[in-house]
Amino acid sequence: MSKETPWHAGKLPEWTKLPNEWIEGHGLKELRWIAGQGADNLAALMTYTVILNHIEPAGGSANLTYDALCEMTSLSRAKISRGLDVLSGFCLIERGAGGRSGYQVRNYNPDTGWVKFPARGLYGNGTVRAFTSFRLRHRAELDAMKLYFLFASRRDRRSNMAKISYDKIEEYSGVSREHIKRALTILGANSLVHIEHVPSGAYADGVASAYRLVHLNSRQHMGTWGRGTDKFDFLDAAGDMSWSGDGN
């Protein structure tokens, strides 16, 4: 089991803690691509990513100026503002915690109810590399970020992968089946997620897809623990994956 990296202001750990009850409660479905809101919802998840990456682990608060948020997300101040409005509206953050530049992640408990969320590996030259390619004009970008958060929530501790069927992806994220593949393409092209083909007794060809977050436990992958995995481990088509909010 990996140990939590000590937190220091200005130095990102490999991962930080993402409260995931809202994800398991189908909260991602509320972030829709509809007229006048789609780009703001995408900006919200981009901004939430950066806030999560900079929280102090004991209390879940972050202190980030607008300039810092703009630099790290590649978003304008106007988009940051609207993204923060969305996050506040969905009770994911509390603004003004500890000062004008303070943000408190809501429902944060350092001991339970969280999953690992990539941090340090996302950045290059102080910016989230993947976000530099986002234009906030396409639904697929929002869908990709929703899947990214869902995969983080559903990541299995032992395999380091999210083993989840298209049916469950659609149920929990609101991304319809016909849009999932395009979202996965964006995640892959931006080095956010690797797609693995794993044994499964739930499919006729005996193979299913599983999803590994690129910058999390990077030494733990199919090549290090082998492909001789019991098919039962990947039986996901019929029911919910079990998950635990304690750093899985």
Image: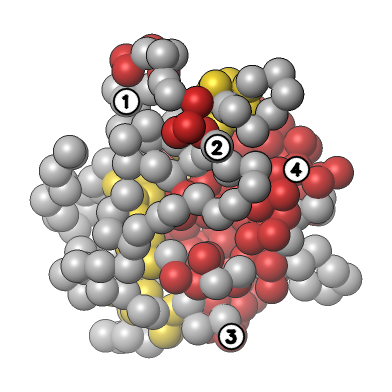
Cβ atoms at labels 4 and 1 below 8 Å apart: no
Residue 151 rendering spot, x and y as whole percentages: 52, 47
| Mark 1 to mark 3 CA distance (whole Å) | 37 Å
Earlier residue among tags 2 and 3: 3
Front-most of 149 and 242? 242
Three-letter amino acid code at the position of disc 2: Leu
Q: Look at the numbered disc 3 and give the secondary structure of its residue.
A: helix
Among the 4 quarters of the image, the one containing residue 244: bottom left
Q: Local crowd at mark 1 within 10 Å, few (<14), some, or many (≥20)?
A: some
The answer to whether residue 208 is left or right of residue 233 is right
| Mark 4 to mark 1 CA distance (whole Å) | 25 Å
Earlier residue among tags 1 and 3: 3
| Mark 2 to mark 4 CA distance (whole Å) | 20 Å
Q: Look at the numbered disc 4 and give the secondary structure of its residue.
A: helix
Task: In the rendered view, tell whether residue 64 sits above or below residue 101.
Answer: above
* Residue that mark 3 sits on: 89
- Say if residue 24 shows up in the picture: yes
Residue 36 rendering spot, x and y as whole percentages: 83, 73
Task: In the rendered view, tell whether residue 239 sits above or below residue 233.
Answer: below
Three-letter amino acid code at the position of disc 4: Ile
Residue ID at (41%, 55%): 243
For the N terminus, which image quadrant?
A: top left
Q: Look at the numbered disc 1 and give the secondary structure of its residue.
A: loop
Front-most of 152 and 37? 152
Task: In the rendered view, tell whether residue 100 sits above or below residue 233.
Answer: below
* Residue that mark 2 sits on: 235
Numbered mark located on residue 220 in the image:
1
**Disc 2 versus disc 4: nearer the observer:** 2
